[in-house]
Amino acid sequence: MPSVFIKTYGCQMNERDSEAVAAQLVARGWSLAKSENVADVVLLNTCSVRDFAEQKAIGKMQNIAADVRKNRPDVVLGFMGCMAQSRGRELIDKLPDVDLVLGTQKFHRAADYLDEIISGARKKIVDVAEEQGSEATIREHLLNGNAKKSAAAFVSIMQGCNQHCTFCIVPATRGEERSRTIPDIVAECRELVSRGVKEITLLGQIVTSYGKREKRDEWQVARDAAVLPPVTRHSSPVTPFVQLLDAVHEIDGLERIRFTSPHPKGYGDDLIDAYARLPNLCESAHLPVQSGSNRVLKLMHRGYTREKFLGIVKKLRAARPEIGITTDIIVGFPGETQNDFEETLSLAREVEFDNAYIFKYSPRRDTPAAEMPDQVPQKIREERNQRLLELVNEIAARKYEKFVGRRVQILVEGPSWKNPARMTGRTRCNKIVLFDGSDRHRGHLMYLKITRAGSFTLYGDPAIVNL
Ligand code: 5AD
C-alpha cells in the first residue's frame, strides 16, 4: 500500500483537516511517511489568509516537483485546502507536476481520488465544488495505532464563515456557514473520550455562530431526544453554541473543553455565563480584536467597538479571574493612521493580552479592503508590526513571570520538539509548560510547580508541587 506525507500550513482547522485525511488513508491500509523524500504521495494542505502563506506552499511544491519527482517520477503531488479552493485549476496550469487539487469541502474524497490517480484511471483531478453536508465529513481521528497518541483532540463543529470582514478571504475559501448537529458532535466526543481523550477543542472558522443558520426543528428533535440539557437552566436566551457547550460538558470523563476560533460579537452574556457555570470549560479565550481603533474596526466590518471589546474582557475576567486571553491583530490595514495605530497600542496595554498574533495587512483577491484607498506602505506596516510585537512581548513576559511559584494543572502532550528529554503540556489557561519527564507522563493530567518563566513558556517541577 502507498505511503503519504501531508504538510500543513495555517490554522488549527487545517491541522484537523490534514489529520482527517491521514486517518482516512490509514483506514485503507496506507502508511504515514516520515518526509516528502520517501512518500508515494505528497499533499500540501494550504492557507490563503496572507499572500506569504500561499507563496510558501507554492515554493515548497516547486522544490518537491524539482527534487522528489526527478528521482521518483511516480510520486503523486497534490494541493488541498484553502489555496486549492480559491485557485483551483490555475494551480495545475502554473505547476504542471501537480496531480490533484482538492477543495475545502472535499477532504473526504481524498482517498478515492488518490486511488484513481495511482491506478491510472485518471491523470489529473481538480475538485473544488461545493458539497452539501460536507460539514459532517471531518470526523476520522488518528488516535488508534498512532504512536503519538495524545489525550487532546480536535473536533470540527462547523465549516465556513458569513462574517465577511473586509480583509478576509475565508468566506471565499471555506464557503457559507454550515454546522453539524449537537447529537452528531456529542457522539464523536464521547467516542474520543472512550478512547482516552481528556481534552477536546471544538473547531470552526467562527464557532460562536455555530448553529445560527440551521433549522430550529433539528435542535428541538435533539432536545426531545434528551441529548440537550433543558433550556430552563439558563436565565437568558441561549445560543446554539452555548447549548453545544452544555451538551459536551455533560460527557463523563471529559476533563477539559476549549474552542477556537470565536468572534468577539459572539460573546453574549450566555457565553460569559457558560464560563462561570461550566467548570470543565478551560479558562482561556482567543479573542481576535484586529484593531483598537473604532474607525478601523468599522472599515474592517467587525461589528463591535473598542468599548464593547473591553467590556467583554472585563466580564470574562469577572467570571474567571485566571482566564488567559490571546488575540489576533492586523497592523497596516488600509487607511490606518498613526493615531489609529496608537489606539491599538493603548488597547493592548489596557487588556494585557497573554499573547497576540500580529499580522501585517496583506491584500487578498476579491476582498473589499484590497480596493480601499490609502493602502499603508510596506515599510510602515513593518515598523508598526515591530513596535506592537515589542509591547506584546513585554506585557506577556510580565504575565508569565507571575506564574513562578504557582501550582498549575497541565495535560501532558508529549516530548518537547526542541529537547526530547523534556515533556510538554498546557495549563488550563493554555500556557505551554516544560518539565523533565518521560513518556509515562504522556496523556496524564498532572500538577506541578512553576519554577521559572521563559519566552511564552513556563518551566515546572512535579516533584515540589506540594512544597
Ligand atoms: N492580512 C493580514 N492578516 C489577515 N488575517 C486575516 N486576513 C488577513 C489579511 N488579509 C489575520 C486576522 C485573522 C488571522 C487568522 O489572520 O488577524 O484573525
Image (spheres, grey):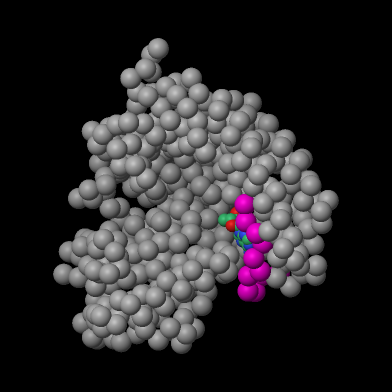
Residue 6 position (above or below residue 88): above
Magenta-colored stretch includes residue 363: yes
Q: Quadrant of residue 275?
A: top right
Q: Nearer the viewer, residue 34 or 224?
A: 34
Magenta segment boundaries in residue numbering: 358-368
Q: Is residue 124 visible?
A: yes
Which quadrant contains ligand 1?
Answer: bottom right
Examine the image and state in which quarter residue 60 appears: bottom left
Q: Residue at x 68, y 47 (%)?
A: 388
Nearest the viewer among 454 and 136 is 454
Please state if 286 lies on the left or on the right of 447 as rendered. right
Please say if 93 is above or below 21. Answer: below
Left or right of 365? Residue 97 is left
Q: Is residue 274 left or right of residue 251?
A: right
Q: Please tell me in which quadrant of the rendered image residue 296 appears.
A: bottom right
As for residue 38 lying within the magenta part, the answer is no
Q: Residue 211: x, y in percent?
A: 52, 51
